[in-house]
Image (cartoon, rainbow, N blue to C red):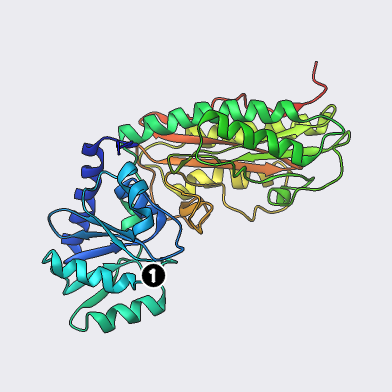
Amino acid sequence: MVRDLTFSVDEYRRRLLLVQALMAARRLDCVILDEPEMMAWLSGYTVSENLWRTCIVPASGEPFLLVRKLDIPPARQRSWMEDIVGFGDWDDPLVALVDALRERSITHKHIGADFQSNSFTVQRHNRLRELLPGSDICDLERSAWSLRGRKSAEEIAHMKRAGSLLDSALQATVREIERGKSQRDVAGAAASAYYKLGFDDGFVGPLNVGSGWDSLHGFLEERPLADGDIVHIELLPRLRFYTVRIMRSVIVGRATDEQRAAAETLISLQDQQIAALRPGAAAADVDRIVREGVVAAGLRDSYDNITGYTLGVTPLVSQHTSDLYRCFTPHSDWVIEEGMVFHMYTSAAGLAISDSIVVTRSGGERLTKTPRQIFETDAT
């Protein structure tokens, strides 16, 4: 089988060294990385948890993947790792893990695992303690997630390509909106564009009609679109497990003067926020620009949601639709670093605007280039 890697082997080995440096600092012999995000980031491959699967990293030397035998062929296609261990569908994967550690003479007195992982359940934790009674299992405390914060040059290039494709998907989605069409027609156009452009799947993202800032997440309605409807589009496709995102609002018919003024204010405030995304800036200060600005402009009585969050690896099989490990709130106590990538978004008066942003030395740079405006089906 011909391998089809997303990144160079050197890039994946760079990531392996980051994990092993973290392990050295925590004095760990090996780590269990069973979350889809970490598996995909380190190995290039992940899969749903019909049966448990994981990536194992020793303190030195080569890592290995543990997957059901059915998943070995796609793992070999997308992963750079040579060592892939398979188990039968009726086998205990934890027993297979212990056997693999012993066969490879991997020291496992101190094992790291992320206790917040949805895959590393209490039952699995307890079972592993039974199988390895002489081992300590330590909580990584989400420290491995920090390794993914700053994107490499290869990752940024990949996400820039994804942003360009996303602009095309948005154009196809906006073109589908007109009075009499259903929201399912619009979602279908987006899903079709995803597949045609080369994204991983057809999961569209939030798409609905609403009138308030809190109408961003809703359900597809069956009624046809009518004059005055505000169609909220949030597209979040994945390209080789990496996600980029964009939000725009489309008015069926013509926008009112009030809507145009509200959009202008939102865009202006967010432009200031994007420019403030400089290395060394405090995340809470960046958040404040939009949060306090929108309330001061009278567009909201209060601002009760985040104004941005991390972008990167978010496979469809993850239970996390979004990576909120780093997000923008009044209590964010971390600083901006060059190479971080965020989805920055804001909303008010039924309108929403967002883009995918990479942090450069001089400020935020948009990965999505769609004009920052509200769209109108009857625009002249």
Residue that appears at 46% across and 63% down: 50
Mark 1 is surrounded, within 10 Å at the Cα level, by few (under 14), some (14 to 19) or many (20 or more) other residues, namely: some
Give the quadrant of the C terminus: top right
| x and y, in percent, of residue 20 in the image | 19, 55
Image check: 4 left or right of 222?
left
Occupied quadrant, residue 136? bottom left
Residue that appears at 65% across and 25% down: 171
Mark 1 lies on residue = 120
Residue that appears at 73% across and 50% down: 215
The relative height of residue 13 versus residue 175 in the rendered view (above or below) is below
Residue that appears at 82% across and 31% down: 252
Give the quadrant of the N terminus: top left
| x and y, in percent, of residue 329 in the image | 52, 53
The relative height of residue 172 versus residue 298 in the rendered view (above or below) is above
The relative height of residue 321 versus residue 130 in the rendered view (above or below) is above
Instruction: Report the amino acid beneath label 1.
Output: Phe
The relative height of residue 206 versus residue 304 in the rendered view (above or below) is above
Q: Secondary structure at mark 1?
A: loop
In the depicted view, which residue is nearer to us: 83 or 307?
83
